[in-house]
Image: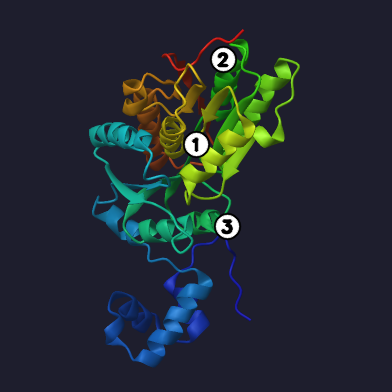
């Protein structure tokens, strides 16, 4: 049986040992699959998949001073927050002569693992990503290559640098704002992911500080965007909250549409706070939890550049940025 340490980068030599095919033939097959017989190509491809081999174009590009690309995997393509953040990161990276490459969207058939593999074979010097529940191979994939990883918004791996917004505190602020305005029956709506789970914890903490308990039925987490408006409307009608907190931008947009359809006026009939500020929230005068985009973008860019340039062994960085509440006119005092 052929064994290889998961934390060691798989090389063409490992492929040779596994397949008993010469390194020259394997190298030729990887560069030009049509240059070898279909039988040998099938054996090589099987070894590549089983051993987790990734062509290390980054190493050769360093010799040519071309390793200046940084990959950013963006999970939520519909969230306008990322448009502003990408612009800020891109501007700051350009000042350091780095280029930002974007990979948008995930699906059941297109995981973060796949995006990471694509970046690793595309001359990136660093990868920025938000871990999620299914990122089983990300750590292994990245550690096989000489690439700097940066976790954003969720810290799932203790041995990688991370930059997170204090989502716990952000939702705590929003919930406390509503409770102090007399809203005890609040509905919080989000998705079933790590970020929203952290935000829910802040929601519960605000209730605890007031000597209250957040009701389970008032915590509404969705698995997908399918039939989103219908599900939100049904829950609002069932729970009849006096206030709502949405903890994902897509849900915030749909909630506003649902409330309009239900002929519920903000804030006269129901109060609303959004997580993630946006131009449309400003336009509609809705109170929101916002992130200091300029500070966040600059911090991310500086951290990834420093991480690429200084790879000496050190303790992983863990940077936390506090969100802020942007007061508008969507919360009514019912005390």
Residue 224, compared with residue 255, is above or below; it is below
**In which quadrant of the rendered view does residue 134 lie?**
bottom right
- Mark in the foreground, 1 or 2: 2
Q: Residue at x 37, y 40 (%)?
A: 309
The percent position of residue 165, horizontal first and vertical second, equals 50, 29
Badge 2, how many Cα within 10 Å: few under 14, some, many 20+? some
Closer to the camera in the image, 205 or 244: 244
Disc number placed over residue 153 in the picture, else none: 1
**Where in the figure is residue 269, as x and y percent of width and height?**
50, 20
Which element carries disc 3, helix, strand or loop? loop
The residue carrying mark 3 is 136
What label does residue 206 carry, if any?
none
Q: Residue at x 55, y 20 (%)?
A: 174
Residue 186 horizontal/vertical position (percent):
61, 25
Q: CA distance from mark 2 to mark 3?
A: 38 Å
Work out whether 53 lies above or below 241. below
Residue 86 screen position, x and y as percent = 32, 37
The local secondary structure at tag 1 comes to: loop
């Amino acid at each position: 049986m052929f064994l290889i340490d998961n934390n060691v980068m798989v090389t063409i030599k490992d492929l040779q040992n596994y397949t008993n095919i010469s390194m020259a033939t394997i190298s030729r097959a990887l560069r030009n699959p049509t240059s070898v017989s279909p039988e040998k190509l099938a054996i090589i491809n099987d070894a590549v998949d089983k051993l987790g081999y990734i062509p290390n174009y980054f190493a050769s590009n360093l010799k040519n001073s071309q390793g200046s690309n940084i990959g950013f995997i963006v999970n939520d393509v519909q969230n306008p927050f990322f448009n502003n953040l990408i612009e800020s990161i891109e501007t700051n990276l350009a000042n350091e002569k780095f280029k930002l490459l974007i990979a948008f969207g995930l699906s059941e058939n297109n995981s973060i693992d796949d995006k990471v593999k694509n970046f690793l074979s595309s001359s990136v010097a660093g990868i920025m990503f938000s871990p999620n529940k299914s990122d089983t191979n990300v750590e292994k994939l990245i550690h096989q290559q000489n690439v700097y990883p940066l976790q954003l918004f969720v810290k799932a791996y203790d041995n990688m640098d991370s930059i997170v917004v204090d989502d716990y505190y952000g939702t705590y602020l929003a919930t406390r704002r509503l409770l102090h305005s007399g809203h005890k029956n609040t509905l919080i709506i989000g998705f079933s992911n790590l970020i929203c789970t952290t935000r829910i914890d802040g929601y519960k903490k605000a209730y605890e500080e007031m000597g209250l308990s957040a009701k389970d039925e008032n915590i509404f987490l969705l698995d997908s965007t399918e039939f989103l408006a219908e599900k939100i409307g049904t829950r609002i009608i069932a729970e009849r909250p006096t206030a709502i907190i949405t903890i994902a931008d897509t849900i915030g947009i749909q909630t506003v549409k649902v409330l309009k359809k239900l002929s519920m006026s903000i804030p006269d009939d129901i109060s609303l706070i959004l997580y993630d500020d946006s131009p449309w929230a400003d336009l509609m005068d809705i109170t929101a939890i916002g992130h200091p985009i300029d500070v966040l973008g600059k911090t991310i860019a500086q951290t990834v550049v420093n991480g690429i340039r200084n790879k000496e062994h050190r303790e992983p960085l863990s940077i936390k940025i506090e969100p802020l509440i942007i007061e508008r006119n969507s919360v009514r005092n019912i005390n």
